[in-house]
Amino acid sequence: MFFIYKLVFVSSLFLGTMITISSYSWLGAWMGLEINLLSFIPLMKIKNNSYSSEVSMKYFLIQALASSIFLFMVILMISQSKMMNESYLINSSMLIILNSTILMKLGAAPFHFWFPEIIEGMNWNNSLILLTWQKIAPMVILSYSIENNSFIIMIILLSTFIGSIGGLNQISLRKILAYSSINHIGWMLSTFLINEMMWALYFLIYSFMSLSIITIFNKFNLFMLKQLFNMLNTKILIKFFIMMNLLSLGGLPPFLGFLPKWIIIQNLSLNHFLTLMFMIMMTLITLFFYLRIMYSSIMLFNNEINFSKMINQINFNSFTINLLSFLSINGLILYSMLINFY
């Protein structure tokens, strides 16, 4: 019964996103966003966890506020177009407000304050949905409506700055991934300065890396840095996969996470050099707190590591974890080999 209940809401969650993507009107896009919202809230409910109800209410209020402002602006645009006898009329202030509501749904800075708090009350499966699938519909709408370069550059700078600074003080793995996601949103939005659909490549690689790291966290029930540190003497190989996946998520070469950043750096270096330099410096800060996690977890204990036991720790039932980690770690190398081959 529980599986059927979950399957229904997951299906309607996907349906809402598909309606938004394929819609030809603003009202259709709003309807898809609402279906997506009302489908995700029941999935957030966790048994024997009273905090999940509070998180569900917070998420509903934030998303409902953004949706109501979005709908108000859409009605205002339609009424103004009819009054002026124009088929489509929108001024820059309307467009900024409309995009701000979508950025609030997305969790981009400076509309990010709800994002780390809500993800803290979720399990890893719901966190993965919030970090990946829930970004698709808002990003598609933004790709349709973003026209003001100065506004989008301001959002990019704020997102990369807050995403990097906010994660420095955190001990919760979910909040670290949330602030890392805000930083990645800044990089995704920067693709609008190059090509409206280049964000899809970045999003696919980011989703794959998030799936890889969250699969490990979910399997071993890890939520805090202390739990990660305590794995040193028990599961050394899994800890190695975690660290390499975190470095890939931070965009360190030669891991897969560097590939989309490499493409963006090549395309933005001519016209938006200062913006690009700021984004790179902020990404170095995210790499710093990933490296700090890695350094602390390895140096926390001074027990001698017996590497001969690492092979015995490989559980062939964990083939998915090993495969995802391998692709996330060596993806850039495999991509370069394929390019050279063809």
Image (tube, helix red, strand yellow):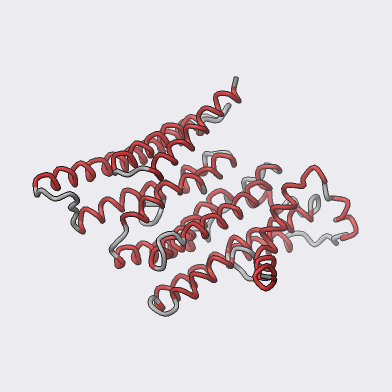
Q: Is residue 275 above or below residue 312?
A: below
Residue at figure coordinates x 38%, y 39% from the top left: 33
Extreme residue in the top direction: 1
Residue at figure coordinates x 32%, y 59% from the top left: 146
Extreme residue in the front direction: 342
Return the residue nearer the eye: 309 or 91: 91
Which of the 4 image quarters holds residue 38? Answer: top left
Question: Where in the figure is residue 306, as x and y percent of width and height?
Answer: 88, 59
In the shown orientation, is residue 132 left or right of residue 148? right
Q: Is residue 58 above or below residue 6?
A: below
Residue at figure coordinates x 45%, y 58% from the top left: 185
Question: Where in the figure is residue 260, as x and y percent of width and height?
Answer: 54, 65
Question: Where in the figure is residue 281, as x and y percent of width and height?
Answer: 49, 73
Viewer can see residue 296: no
Quadrant including the N terminus: top right
How many numbered dots are placed on residues in this image?
0
Residue at figure coordinates x 30%, y 53% from the top left: 99
Viewer can see residue 303: yes
Return the residue nearer the eye: 36 or 127: 36
Question: Where in the figure is residue 59, as x and y percent of width and height?
Answer: 41, 38
Quadrant including the C terminus: bottom right
In the shown orientation, is residue 208 left or right of residue 327? left
Return the residue nearer the eye: 5 or 104: 5
Extreme residue in the right direction: 308
Return the residue nearer the eye: 145 or 184: 145
